[in-house]
Image: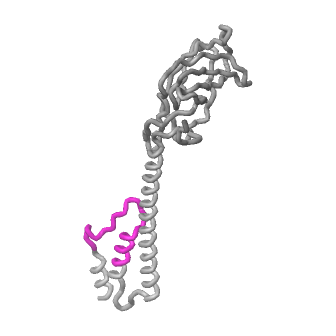
Amino acid sequence: MAINSINTITQTTSSDAIYNPKSELDKDAFMKLFLTQLQMQDPTDPMDTDKMLEQTAYLSTMEMNTNMQKTLENLSNTLNKTSELSVLNAIGKIADTGFRYLNVTENEESTNFELYFGDDISSGKVIIKDKNGQIVKEFPLEAHSKGVLNFDWDLKDNYGQKVKADTYEIMAEYTSPDGKNHTTALGAYPIESIRFENGIPYAKLGSNYIPFDEIQEIYEWQG
């Protein structure tokens, strides 16, 4: 009779089934399994108290791990949002990529580049040097308001000869209307905006968007 009684108790409906498609024993599945085990135990030979305490302790550990995982996920989300806000705070500041050189290839007939002038220009000149520091080209700057200016270079030196394929340093020296002297160089521009692509921030420098991790320094313009 005892055996028949046990068989009757173990019959379950579809609603009692534990659905766990990933075959992972989470706390809910463990609790259902534990309760089912209690229901199925032989009343004349109940589960050992120590074993029951061991299983409840395991359930408690799973609960703690689940809560910790949720806490870590929330912390990660908070840090990501904080990081995004810190990136947005860089808008309006000067970003320096450190890329001072322009690459010239053999088949190019001309190229263009951008320089940022943080003060109005009264007069000045753009200076192009080879990688040995020798000046190959200079051209004057006319009076202009501050901002990012675009320049076209026909890839000819001061003597009208086409320069060879190489890398060239670009910079400018200029005087503002108040008589102060300034310098600027390729690679330093104000951050106009920030764009996110798949969670990765890109800063708009001049007419281009640059991955934020390519920026070497961010600072306030000192006129």
Name the residue at 28% across, 71% down: 16
Q: State the image quarter where residue 14 is shown.
A: bottom left
State which quarter of the image contains the C terminus: top right
Q: Is residue 210 left or right of residue 45?
A: right
With respect to residue 88, does 109 lie above or below? above
Q: Is residue 118 left or right of residue 77?
A: right
Coordinates of residue 154 in the picture (x, y in percent):
58, 12
With respect to residue 168, does 12 lie above or below? below
State which quarter of the image contains the N terminus: bottom left
In depth, the one of 151 and 109 nearer the eye is 151
- Looking at the image, the residue that sits furthest to the bottom is 44
Name the residue at 55% across, 38% down: 222
Q: State the image quarter where residue 135 is shown.
A: top right
Coordinates of residue 25 in the picture (x, y in percent):
42, 67
Say how the picture is coloured: one colour
Coordinates of residue 57 in the picture (x, y in percent):
45, 80
Q: State the image quarter where residue 101 is shown.
A: top right
18 part of magenta stretch: yes
- Looking at the image, the residue that sits furthest to the right is 132
With respect to residue 94, does 143 lie above or below? above
Coordinates of residue 209 in the picture (x, y in percent):
48, 33
Name the residue at 52% across, 33% down: 189
In depth, the one of 146 and 148 nearer the eye is 146
In depth, the one of 183 and 92 nearer the eye is 183
75 part of magenta stretch: no
Count of labels in the image = 0
Magenta part of the chain = 12-36
- Looking at the image, the residue that sits furthest to the top is 160
Q: Is residue 109 left or right of residue 92?
A: right
